[in-house]
Image: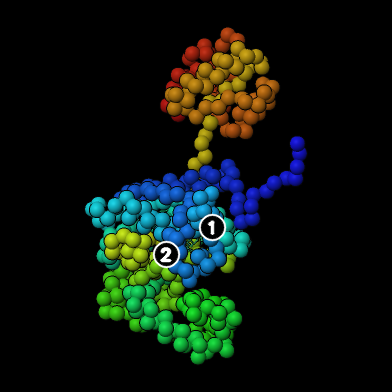
Amino acid sequence: MSGAKLKAPRGTFDVLGGDACVRAGIESRARTLLGAAGYERIETPAFEATELFERGVGESTDIVRKEMFTFEDAGGRSLTLRPEGTAPVCRAYVEHGMHKRRQPVKLWYLSSFFRHERAQAGRYRQFWQIGSEILGSEDPAVDAESIALLAGLLDELGVRELRLRLSSLGARETRAAYREQLQAYLRANESSLSPEVRERIELNPLRAFDSEHPGTREVMAGAPRLLDQLGTEDAEHFAEVRALLDIASVAYEIDPTLVRGLDYYTRTVFEFTSDALGAQSGVGGGGRYDRLVEQLGGPPTPGMGWAAGVERVMLAGGAPPAASQAVELFLALERPEPELRGVAFRLLGEARSAGLAAQMDLGGRSLKGQLGHAAALGARYVGIVAPSHVVLKDMQAGEQTELAADAVVHAVLRGHHAL
Ligand code: AMP
């Protein structure tokens, strides 16, 4: 049966060869860096109860209002493909009683996330994030360590033209009072605002700071600022975070207009952007969420975390140095005969058990075709399996020897060590 050609859904993409290697390299750097800093890997399910995100991320956010992939299962339960990682990690922290462990608990993840966004370069409907969360301590050193680790990772990966913006949203109460003040200010200047911002005065007034609309920008330049209204403890906490970042030589700009798209943030918030990216310049960001665990039914537990988009990291030039797997031994058949294939297959197994990167012809090629394929793979040695022996070619030295089949792997290993 034939039919129309099918394509991956809008806003999604396949990860192929070269890209898969770059991604594996990014993952391995993250694992090394975060593992050495004492973070444990966590993976949560791809979907969760919808309520987790409604309660955790917040009903007023764009994510919950219009970007979630939500569906009902056969039992009528509302489920949602995870749009972000912090709420699921907090859910897992409570569910597994991690608050009873020695605090803080440090976790990291690399998972795919789903948001029904307008697809464009750097903005997808399924994308990958590396994220870290520290739960159980409000020490400013937690904030600084968390930010410094992401700075270190992005730097090591070679992300270009990075900028770090930093701010503090203070306590929930400060933010609630500020919200009212900002709403009053926006209403007083309503005629100059863009229709979208006007519509969001009630629901999410802070997003007005994100607007590109000229009239709105002018109004926002004179808007009251949350950073000027922090309570004493919050202001001290923020000062200590900044002092620690200075000690760690992490460069940042204070940006009082920095608002993150999620409701759960308190105190420190930050965002890394890359000028090498276009409109979607956010590479990674995060902040402190001291009330979230409690909001999800757990004991009062402060938390701090970040997430960085793997695709954005790659688009901004971030990739580990290529470490493609060199083929050490390629086994070719002198003639397309089952017995020779059997010998090659056995040698392939032996070579792999001995730790060699080995391949054999799987394409039914002629001997010439196999040698061409081995050259294209950059094979260091090629073993041509003949009925009574194997011709082992050292492709670098341009030499060849005739050996018994049983001696091939040993010879390659020896040659290899002699290199
Ligand atoms: P957020 O959870 O919105 O703070 O996102 C954290 C990071 O994830 C961003 O800085 C981006 O790098 C990445 N990101 C968020 N949404 C998308 C998306 N739709 N497509 C690709 N990357 C994304």
Q: Say what amino acid the circle numbered 2 marks.
A: Arg
Secondary structure found at label 1: strand
Quick one: label 2, few (<14), some, or many (20+) residues within 10 Å?
A: some
Q: Say what amino acid the circle numbered 1 marks.
A: Thr
**Near-viewer residue (419 or 135):** 135
**Near-viewer residue (318 or 349):** 349
Q: Which residue does the image show at 27% across and 55% down from the upper left?
A: 99
Q: Residue 315: percent from the left, percent from the top?
A: 55, 57
Q: Which residue does the image show at 66% across and 17% down from the upper left?
A: 336
* Image quadrant where residue 182 sits: bottom left
Among numbered discs 1 and 2, the one appearing first in the sequence:
2
Q: Residue 399: percent from the left, percent from the top?
A: 56, 21
Per the image, the residue denoted by label 2 is: 55
Q: Residue 128: percent from the left, percent from the top?
A: 50, 53
What is the CA distance from the residue labelled 1 to the residue labelled 2? Answer: 15 Å
Which residue, as the protein is rendered here, is positioned at the far bottom?
188
The answer to whether residue 183 shows anywhere in this view is yes
Colouring convention used in this rendered image of the protein: rainbow
The answer to whether residue 416 shows anywhere in this view is no
Question: Dividing the image into 4 quarters, which one contains the C terminus?
Answer: top left
Per the image, the residue denoted by label 1 is: 70
**Vertical order, 60 against 387 (above or below):** below
Q: Are marks 1 and 2 in contact (CB under 8 Å)?
A: no
**Near-viewer residue (60 or 336):** 60
Q: Which residue does the image show at 50% across and 48% down from the upper left?
A: 23
Question: Dividing the image into 4 quarters, which one contains the N terminus?
Answer: top right
**Vertical order, 186 against 21 (above or below):** below
Q: Residue 165: percent from the left, percent from the top?
A: 43, 70
Q: Which residue does the image show at 48% across and 71% down from the upper left?
A: 60
Quick one: label 1, few (<14), some, or many (20+) residues within 10 Å?
A: some
- 258 relative position to 332: left or right: left
